[in-house]
Image (cartoon, rainbow, N blue to C red):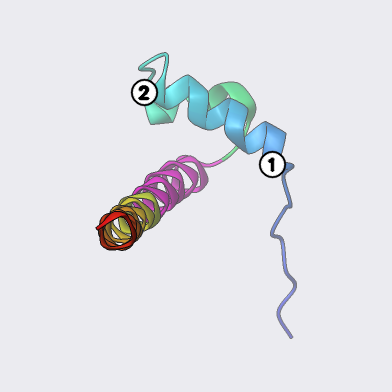
Amino acid sequence: MTISTARHYSIDFQHQVINEVKVHNRLLSDVAKQYGISAKTVYKWVKQSDTRKSETRGEIVSEIAHLQQKITQLSQQLQAMAS
């Protein structure tokens, strides 16, 4: 039988740790020691943060492209109505 030792940290706490690494340019290992968590956990949070930002960025680019197409279509319809 395996006993789970995984801890659950709040999102605010995770953001605070990620902020220390990314904004304040601190070493992962130093931040992990300061907060009493494993460097592996900090690494995982930072990597997930980067992945989420990439996904969000991709969604935004896709939405912009869709809206530009819609603007073009509506502009063409407006020109056709004005003719």
Give the image quarter of residue 26: top left
Q: Which residue is mark 2?
A: 27
Question: Residue 25: x percent and y percent?
Answer: 35, 17
Residue shown at the point (56%, 29%) measured from the top left = 17
Residue shown at the point (50%, 31%) measured from the top left = 18
Estimate the spatial distance between the alpha carbons at disc 2 and disc 1, rounded to whole Å: 20 Å
Compared with residue 39, is residue 73 higher up or lower down, i.e. above or below?
A: below
The quadrant in which the N terminus is found is bottom right
Compared with residue 5, is residue 53 higher up or lower down, i.e. above or below?
A: above
For the magenta stretch, what is the residue range? 38-57
Residue type for callout 2: Leu
Residue shown at the point (44%, 51%) measured from the top left = 52
* Residue furthest to the front: 83
SS assignment for the magenta stretch, majority: helix
Residue type for callout 1: Ile
Of badges 2 and 1, nearer the viewer stands 1
Compared with residue 47, is residue 18 higher up or lower down, i.e. above or below?
A: above
Q: Which residue is mark 1?
A: 11
Magenta span has 44? yes
- In the figure, is residue 39 to the left or right of 25? right
Give the image quarter of residue 46: top left
Question: Residue 70: x percent and y percent?
Answer: 35, 60
Mark 2 lies on a secondary structure that is: loop
